[in-house]
Every structure is written in C-alpha cells, then in structure tokens.
Image: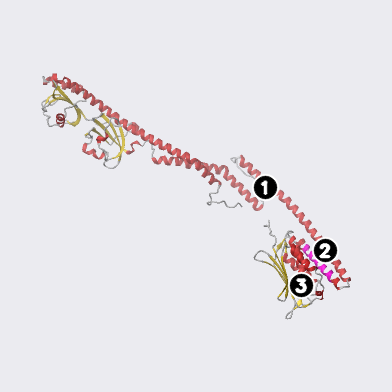
Amino acid sequence: MLSPGRGIEGLDRLDIRLVALLGLALLPIGLIAMVQTYRVISEADRNAEAALTGATLAAATNEREDILHVRGAAQIAASIMPSLLDDPDMCSDEMETFVANNPDVTFAGFISTSGIVECGSDGAGADVSESPIFRSFLEDPVPAIDAVIGQISNRSVIAVTQPVLVEGELAGYVALSVPQRALSLTSEGVADLKPLVSVIFTAEGRVLWAPDGIDEIESALPRHRALQALAGSEPLTMRASSASGPARIYTIAPLVPGEIYAMAVWPEDAVRTSGLTAASAILFPLLMWLVSIGVAYFAVHRLVVRHIRYLRMRIRAFTANRRILRPEYGADTPSEMREVIETFHQMTERIVRDEADLENSLHEKDVLLKEVHHRVKNNLQLIASMMNMQLRKANSGETRFVLRRLQDRVLGLATIHRNLYQATVLSRVESGRLIEELVTQSLRNTEAREQGVEVNVAVEDVALYPDQAVPLSLLVTETITNALKYVGIPENGSPWVELTLEKLPSGDVKLRVANSMGRPVSDEASISTGLGTQLMSAFAMQLDAETEMGERDGIFVVEAIFRPSDFGDEP
C-alpha cells in the first residue's frame, strides 16, 4: 500500500496533475484567443463605424451636390440678372423656365434691397422685408445658404442667396429655394439600421432642419458638446451620452464645408456586428480552454490512468495474497501499457516461483538445524549420563560437587538445544520458558526442596536471539546454582531463593537472583573453587550486561541488566 502523497487531498493524482499542467500550457493559447477576439470585435466596431460614417457621408454627398448645383445656378443667375432688371416680366419668365427645368428648385427670384420680389417664378411683387433671410442679407450681404420656411412656398426649404451688383453697387440678391428632404441614411453593412435622428446644422451651431422639428431633437443631441465644436472639414464619428441620458453614436459629414453639416444619431449597439460582444471575447476562449482540458482529461484517463489503475489493482491483489490475475486489456490499450502489464505478470510469476524455492530452502535449512540441535541435545544428555555414572563411583565429596556442577552446566546446555529444537522459529528463543526449565533442572539435582528452601520464579517472556539466549541460560544456571549452594536460614523465617526476569521501561532486561543468608542449608557451602564467580562474569560480559553482585540487607543479590537485540517485523 502506497503512502499518501503530500499536498491537498486528491491533487496528487496523476490525471489531476496532468490536466493542471495541460491547462497551464493551454492558458497562453486561451489568452491569445481572447486578445484576438477583442481585436476582431474592435475591428468589427471600426468597420461598422466606418459604415455609419460612409452612409452619412453618402447621404451628405447627394445633398451637397444638390446644394452646390443650386449655388452655381444662383451665381449664374446673379451674373445675368442686371440685364433682366429692365424688363421684370422677362425676368419672371426666365425664373419660371429655370424652375421648370430644375425639379429640385421650388422658387427662383430676385429680391431688391427694399425687400420686394422684383421678379420670380412665383410671388412677384411680394414683400419679404420681414423674412430672416432678408434681414440677414442686409446685415451681411454675402453669398449664404440657410434653411427656413419659405415665405412664398410656405415649405421647409434651403435658401441659397447670391448678391447682385449693378455697376458696382448692391442692387439686391438672387434667391433659389430647394425643398428639404430627410437624409437617406441606411447601410447594408449595419443590418439596414436607420438613424434615430438626422440633423442639418450650420458651422455656427444653429440647427437648420430636423425631421421632427428642431425642438424635438434637443434630447438626442450630444450632452455638453456644442454643435459648432463638431463642425470640421472631415467626416467625424464619435460616441457620447445624449442629453436624455443613453449613449449614442454620432456621425457628422459636411454638406458645404465650413458652412452646413449633416449629423446622424445612431443607437449604441449599431456597431455590434455578427453577435460579437465583450462577453463573447471571454466566454468563447474560456469555453475552448475548458473543452481542451476536458479532451485532455478524457485522453489521459482513457489512454493512461485507467490502465495504471488496473495495474495498481493487480499489484494490490498480488501483495495482499500473492494472487496472480490474468492480463486483460482491450484493443485500445496502448502498446506501452500492454508491455508494462505483461512484464508485471511475468515478474509476479517469477517472484512466486522464487519465493517457493526460498521457502523450500528455508524449510530444508530448518529441518537440518533442528536435527543438529536434537543431536547436540542427545549428545549433551549422554555426557550428563556419563557424568552421573562417574558421580556414583566418586568417593570424595569435593569430586562429587565438581562433577555435579559440571553436570548442571551440561544439562543447562542440553536444555537450550532442546528449546531450539522445539522452537517454531529457530532465530527466536522465548527466554521465560527456557529459564523455568533451567531452574527446574537445577532443583532436580539438589535437595533444596527437601531442605525446606522456598524457590520463587517470576519471569516475563523476552524474545532473544540464540547468541543472547545461550549466555543468558548459562548465567541463570550459574546464579541459581550459586544461590542454592549458599542459601541460608535467616533468624526469622525459612530459607528462600528468588529469581526474576523483567523488562524495564527503558527497554532493557534485568535478571535478578537473590537468596536468604544465615546458617547454610547445604554442606557444599564450604566448598568454593571461585569458578562460578568467574563464569558469571564471563557470561555477563558476553551479554554486554551491567552486573552487580553482593550482600544487601541480609540477602545476597546478583543483578545483570542488558539490552536485548531488536527483532524485525515477522513476515
């Protein structure tokens, strides 16, 4: 079982990491697409604005041609008018003929400086001295173009006036009237939109004409922008808030540069073409980015992740119970993944075979080792029996003591080998049962029980390797034999021997053997060779133990503290 990866739960998965990396890699493409979409929208807006400007300019061009045509006619009429003033009837006939030949002109005539129509296509003899055009002419007698309600035709007209000089003196002016028409402002490039309002104004900012009347279009004019500020020599397109509040698009084109201009007011969305909006500039690249990530995730999961998960399932099944699953994969499995799965299958089969061979080898080894321990135990018991035979024939008490001690040591070794022979795991010896058997074996060769010696044994099970169990067993044999030899009867109570083996909180193991002191129980207490003490020190040294030996408060104590070797986890 793999240990969990670091980081936020779930983010250490292969598919999530690959999708994150692919998303990061595709992010610049999405940003580029967003920028390009914005550029397309901006270009479309510019093209639409150009279409609106072109529509306004085309309509203004038609109006301008009509006005310039009429202005030219007014200049010609002003040049020949001095020759017609002597005959008013002939002058009127000429004016009527001019109007008949020019359908766009509704009135042509000559107005003297007194304000009387001296001759004209209509209204000859009329007094126009109160008209705004006449008063404006008197104030500034120059060629002019103005929009008014004709006093004679009583229609909204554009009046073109041209001064007439007779022998260098101002005699009056020729006036030609052209009826006002709504600007034809439509454009196929802007989905046949029509302007909300169309206006004609002068360079001074005076509105000359509007389809719904001058008072009705004030709310559609730009807020905080004077009309005279919009007059220029070139067409103009701008965005601004109208006086009524909503944002509008304004296109301005000169009818007569420096004099008269046409303006069209369009809705703000007139330049949004083909459904392109600022939202689409974000949503469309974002959608593309998400679809790309989704496709990448599907591809990674389909081609890699699901096969890795299948392989993980096979690995877990094998590690749990050594179960080998038959390789299964579809036609869409990549060749690399098929090779990995087949290689893993071959590897598991090889591992199972190798493990079986190892188990057989280990079993044979265990059998041989048990046989060795069994034969060593038998040989040691045979030696002990021979010593027992020799012990029966010995006459000297010291000889019998030495032989008995030697026999105890041999039997102690035999007990160790018997435990190893009976152990399930040869590398592990349970010291508790071993020590109890050693104490029983030592008591069997003495008369301590018959002499009233109380023996208390309290041992904890401590697992030891054989290289520690052997010196510990020999140390126990020596200490318990020494205690049974020198145990004494205290003044109050009966003699006793106590052996404990316990685990300390530090992890060390303490062996403690104590016996009461007083009048010796055994006659062998007087026999001392010093060998037992040397052997105890030697065995303690093999255990790398800290030993303490001596009398404490009327008892004799032998303590040995050592660190047992650590065992690895059993398979």
Question: Is 26 displayed left or right of 370 in the figure?
Answer: left
In the figure, is residue 250 to the left or right of 527?
left
Residue 491 at x, y = what percent? 74, 81
Range shown magenta: 401-418
Label 1 and label 3: CA atoms lie apart by: 59 Å
Q: Report the amino acid beneath label 3.
A: Ala
Label count reads 3
Residue 88 seen anywhere in this rendered image of the structure: yes
Residue situated in front as seen by the camera: 180 or 9: 9
Camera-nearest label, 3 or 2:
3
Q: Earlier in the sequence, mark 3 or mark 2?
A: 2
Dot 2: what SS?
A: helix
Q: How is the image coloured?
A: secondary structure
The one nearer the camera, 267 or 80, is: 80
Residue 410 colored magenta?
A: yes
Mark nearer the viewer, 1 or 3: 3
Give the amino acid at mark 2: Leu
Disc 2 target residue: 380
Q: Is residue 297 left or right of residue 432?
A: left
Q: Label 3 to label 2, Cα distance in Å?
A: 24 Å
Question: Could you give the CA–CA distance between mark 2 and mark 1, rounded to whole angstroms?
Answer: 47 Å
**Disc 1: which residue:** 348
Q: Whole-percent x and y of residue 68?
A: 23, 25
| Residue at the image point whose x is 81% and y is 75% from the top | 526
Number of the label disc, if any, that sits on residue 316 = none
Q: Secondary structure at mark 1?
A: helix
- Check whether the beta carbons of the residues at disc 1 and disc 3 lie within 8 A of each other: no
Type of the residue with mark 1: Thr
Left or right of 378: which side holds 155?
left
